């Protein structure tokens, strides 16, 4: 891939526009000056701005961040509308690695926090909006290319073009490339791994939504249910239901610590709550249950007990767009209608139809090319994620076990599940462990045992795979609770001491399916 990228530059320099058919639009041979360094750009790539940002200077779009080192902030466009940024630490500070950072929800923005984190560690770090701007609420009504750019192509082009620019800028190829993302960014990560296995050596995917069409169908269906039964259960009511499940199942895992170690083992139904009305029980039971389409076909595994359901249309994480991803996907993607009415949603009709517009499935276990070239995968997911359920991520890991064998998978993949953690982070539980979307050093430390990015770096460099990661809960800037997350299928076992200290636990194998 890197060779291809270098070849692209050569093609652009050596042949320029000569090979284009007569009469076609003639792109200029593109040169750019990146903060004092002149390079030749890939032929389809423009740099719109390159800004030298000094150490300790303010960084636009990321208030409060003061970089510890000087870097060149490159903003550009691939083809006609795939916006990207590439942050390049000044020469000697480069760690010879490349970091791709995914964007959640509808994309349309740049993962600047992850780019800042990359720069702090010396990465050349890049992120793309995948071809549209979040402010454009009807983005999917644009060119048909936008769907495929969003689904897969934007990040693939980013990997190739941004690596080419990186190579030209430093005069050397990155020796390792890592992609990190959560939510939609996690789906992007898994898509890279499955469809473009040469783009990245290491993939860190949080809450990936490996079946995004089904997940979006649930989102829309839930919105319709909440709308239809407005006022029946408010946020406090839904929270009480989740709390009742935790109260019942927390001690069943052997330790009363406010967390359900494996909510799949928790047997709880809202009918157990005597203070709920029959109508409330019916609604809650229906929303937690697996979703079925109008023909009775099962669409998803449902919501795990202990996960609070939001009674309003759930806001999209990370991209505060005026329209919800599910509405955009189905309304604009299928019906090309900006005013499509979500109440017209028919699962059995619309769910298969979205697959004809774009491929948002990221659950293909046939990842042999990635595995054969030594690629490594770290997955993580919060057990109490109400937006993107954890179970499909576990299911995906288990399809890998079926294909590669349990020992085989442990050669290239690790899955960490965080009890009580919400979508990507949050939930009032330990949720800092060097996942996507955080600034560098926001956890306990940057050591491999505390930080998944460091763990990936060391694994790729021949070190041991992470057997566990210490997760931390912070309050007012201070860690108040730490806990190990153990690589699936091993589980956390309490061995004695304060429950809020990671040292009171060990990872035990077995006992989990
Ligand atoms: Ca417990």
Image: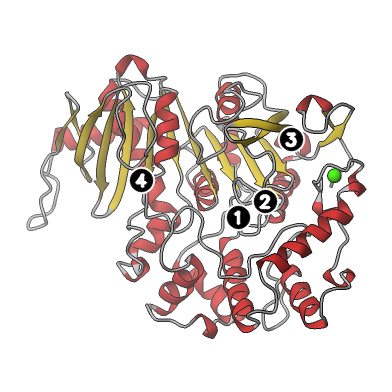
Secondary-structure class at tag 4: helix
Note whether 170 is above or below 295 in the view shown: above
Q: Which residue is mark 1?
A: 210
In the orientation shown, which residue stands out farthest toward the left?
23
Secondary structure of residue under mark 1? loop
Q: Is mark 2 within 8 Å of ligand 1?
A: no
Query: Residue 433 at x, y = what percent?
Result: 62, 33
Vertical order, 440 against 379 (above or below): above
- 496 left or right of 478 in image: right
Classify the position of ligand 1 by quadrant: top left, top right, bottom left or bottom right.
Answer: top right
Residue that label 3 marks: 487
Asked whether residue 123 appears in the rendered view, the answer is no
Tell whether label 4 touches label 1 (CB within 8 Å).
no
Residue at the spot 35% in from the left edge and 33% down from the top edge: 163
x and y, in percent, of residue 86 in the image = 32, 36
- Contact (CB < 8 A) between labels 4 and 2? no
Q: Nearer the viewer, mark 1 or mark 3?
A: 3
Q: Which mark is residue 393?
A: 2
Say if disc 1 is inside 8 Å of ligand 1.
no
- Identify the residue under disc 4: 157
Question: Horizontal placement of 512 versus 326: left or right?
Answer: right
Whole-number angstrom distance, CA of label 1 to CA of label 4: 21 Å
- Of callouts 4 and 2, the N-terminal one: 4
Left/right placement of residue 27 relative to residue 442 reads left
The image quadrant of residue 414 is top right
Q: CA distance from mark 3 to mark 4?
A: 32 Å
């Amino acid at each position: 891939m890197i060779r291809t990228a270098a070849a692209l530059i050569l093609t652009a320099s050596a042949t320029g526009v000569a090979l284009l058919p007569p009469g076609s639009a003639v792109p200029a041979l593109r040169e750019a000056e990146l903060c004092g360094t002149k390079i030749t750009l890939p032929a389809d790539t423009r740099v719109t701005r390159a800004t030298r940002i000094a150490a300790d200077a303010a960084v636009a779009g990321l208030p409060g961040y003061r970089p510890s080192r000087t870097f060149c902030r490159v903003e550009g466009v691939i083809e006609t509308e795939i916006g990207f940024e590439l942050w390049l630490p000044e020469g000697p500070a480069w760690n010879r690695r490349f970091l791709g950072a995914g964007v959640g929800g509808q994309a349309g923005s740049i993962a600047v926090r992850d780019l800042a984190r990359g720069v702090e560690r010396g990465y050349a770090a890049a992120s793309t909006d995948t071809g549209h701007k979040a402010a454009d609420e009807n983005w999917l009504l644009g060119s048909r290319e936008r769907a495929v750019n969003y689904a897969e192509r934007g990040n693939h082009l980013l990997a190739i073009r941004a690596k080419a620019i990186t190579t030209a800028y430093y005069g050397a190829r990155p020796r390792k490339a890592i992609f990190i993302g959560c939510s939609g960014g996690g789906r992007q990560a898994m898509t890279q791994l499955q469809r473009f296995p040469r783009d990245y050596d290491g993939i860190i995917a949080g809450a990936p939504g490996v079946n995004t069409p089904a997940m979006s169908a649930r989102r829309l269906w839930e919105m319709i249910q909440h709308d239809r039964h407005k006022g029946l259960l408010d946020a406090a009511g839904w929270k009480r239901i989740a709390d009742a499940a935790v109260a019942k199942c927390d001690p069943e895992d052997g330790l009363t610590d406010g967390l359900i170690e494996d909510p799949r083992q928790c047997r709880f139904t809202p009918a157990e709550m005597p203070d709920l009305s029959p109508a409330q029980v019916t609604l809650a039971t229906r929303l937690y249950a697996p979703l079925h389409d109008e023909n009775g076909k099962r669409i998803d595994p449902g919501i795990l007990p202990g996960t609070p359901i939001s009674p309003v249309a759930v806001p999209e994480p990370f991209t505060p767009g005026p329209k919800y991803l599910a509405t955009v996907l189905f309304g604009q993607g299928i019906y090309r209608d900006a005013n499509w009415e979500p109440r017209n949603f028919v699962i059995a009709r619309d769910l298969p139809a979205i697959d004809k517009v774009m491929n948002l499935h990221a659950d293909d276990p046939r990842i042999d090319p990635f595995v054969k070239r030594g690629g490594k995968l770290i997955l993580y997911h919060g057990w109490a994620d109400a937006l993107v359920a954890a179970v499909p991520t576990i299911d995906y890991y288990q399809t890998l076990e079926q294909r590669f064998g349990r020992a085989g998978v442990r050669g290239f993949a690790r899955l960490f599940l965080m009890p009580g953690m919400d979508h990507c982070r949050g939930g009032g539980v330990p949720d800092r462990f060097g996942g996507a979307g955080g600034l560098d050093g926001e956890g306990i430390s940057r050591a491999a045992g505390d930080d998944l990015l460091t763990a990936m770096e060391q694994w790729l460099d021949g070190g041991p795979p992470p057997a566990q990661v210490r997760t931390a809960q912070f309050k007012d800037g201070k860690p108040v609770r730490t806990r190990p997350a153990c690589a699936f299928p091993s589980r956390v076992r309490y061995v004695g001491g304060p429950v809020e200290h990671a040292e009171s636990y060990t990872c035990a194998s077995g006992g989990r399916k």
